[in-house]
Image (cartoon, grey):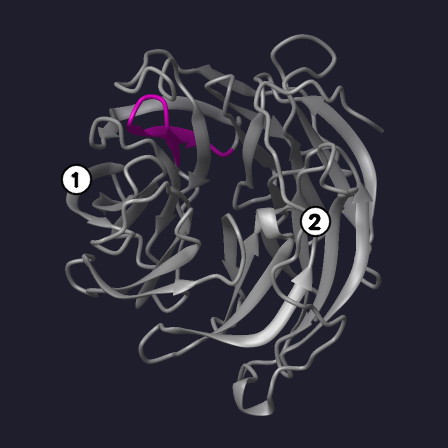
Amino acid sequence: MRFDSGMTKSRNRSLAVALAALSLFPLTASAAAPQRGKYLLYVGTYTEEGTHSKGIYAYSFDASTGEIASLGVAAETTNPSFVAVSPNGRFVYAVNEVGTYKGPNSGGVSAFAVDRATGKLTFLNEVPSRGADPCYITVDKTGKFVLVANYTGGSVAVFPVLADGKLGEASAFVQHTGKGTNPERQEGPHAHSIDLSPDNRFAMVDDLGLDELLVYKFDGAKGSLTPNDPPFANLDAGAGPRHFALSPSGKFAYVVSEMGRTVTVFSNDAASGRLQRLQTITTLPKDFTGRNDDAEIEIHPSGMFLYASNRGHESIAVYAVDPEKGTLTLVEITPTGGKEPRSFEIDPTGKFLFAANQKSDNIVVFRIDEKTGRLTPTGKVLNVPAPVCLKFLKIK
């Protein structure tokens, strides 16, 4: 199973590893998460020439001891830059971020069955993503639909999940139109992420090319998308919204903007899907003047802290969240121990943050201070070629 490797976006990656890695390194007992449980950690990567990546990689993670072990390549597939896990833990879905797949202007979406004993993934099927360079994927709360954002295509699509975990043909497709103020980066729409509200009623889409956070009504029975009223919330001109996070309460939404190098806070009316802007705050030190592209954003399971990554400054900004207002106060900006922290993931226990440094081919593990949200390196570093996305799956 292979995809046409024609790409509309070229990327050069360094193969140097910035930090030494150990194949197995238990975290100290004092740092172990209080709740027990064993997980699989899946890592989506880029497999372009020069990366030496073969596809999706897997690790085992024991939350009671903090022990992490490599399980090797879980599945060979082309440019699985973003992955998602089904709610029942039986399937993994991945976008294949290519420019052409079985025809012009489309990437692919792949479905896999999970072997919970080994972490290996068995290929089920693939479908066209309906737009070029799909870069984000999520599964709805029922596990019945997969939603995809196509970056170069500037579109979003929904695919039904069949009884055996395979994907059917698209049940919904929306082509965005328009452009932003930056002629080089915003010459047209660039859908960069799609996420669902906790009640499965709304889909939120960051479009980097339009400087909009679009809101769609999602029908969980039909797998359809219709514009909400109002259909979007604006961000600053030239901001380039990239990824989205929602507070555990559902009252507040957060958008990291790649080009604006900021996090914007919105209040969220869970009943209507209406968003109102509250605050915009930088992700960088005041004296920083170099190149930087913001990447990932995630809120801590407690709702007390928010994190955003900087590519260029090579760091993660840590914020304290006001529980009543939802607004942010900068706590610290911590180096990620690598180059181009394209993504990161907080483990399900909320004790550790795994930072994926795409261009230094490593994942650096940090301990999260439960009182302040501050990050401290554990000394654990995982060697992975061109890591892009991290997702946990609970197995015990």
How many neighbours does mark 2 have within 10 angstroms: few (below 14), some (14-19), or many (20 or more)? many
Query: Where residue 353 sits in the image (x, y, percent)?
Result: 50, 66
Q: Amino acid at mark 1?
A: Gln
| Quadrant in the rendering for residue 144 | top right
Residue 90, percent from left and from top: 73, 51
The residue that label 1 is drawn on is 276
Q: Residue at x 62, y 73 (%)?
A: 380
Find the magenta span and give its range: 203-220
Question: Which amino acid type corresponds to the residue marked 2 in the rendered image?
Answer: Pro
Give the number of the mark in front: 1 or 2.
2
Answer left or right for 259 relative to 133: left
Identify whether 74 is placed above or below 171: below
Query: Where in the figure is residue 282, as x and y percent of width and height?
Result: 24, 49
Mark before the other along the chain sequence, 1 or 2: 1
Q: Which residue sits furthest top?
A: 104
- The residue singled out by tag 2 in the image is 385
User: Up-down: is 317 above or below 206?
Assistant: below
Main SS of residues in magenta: strand
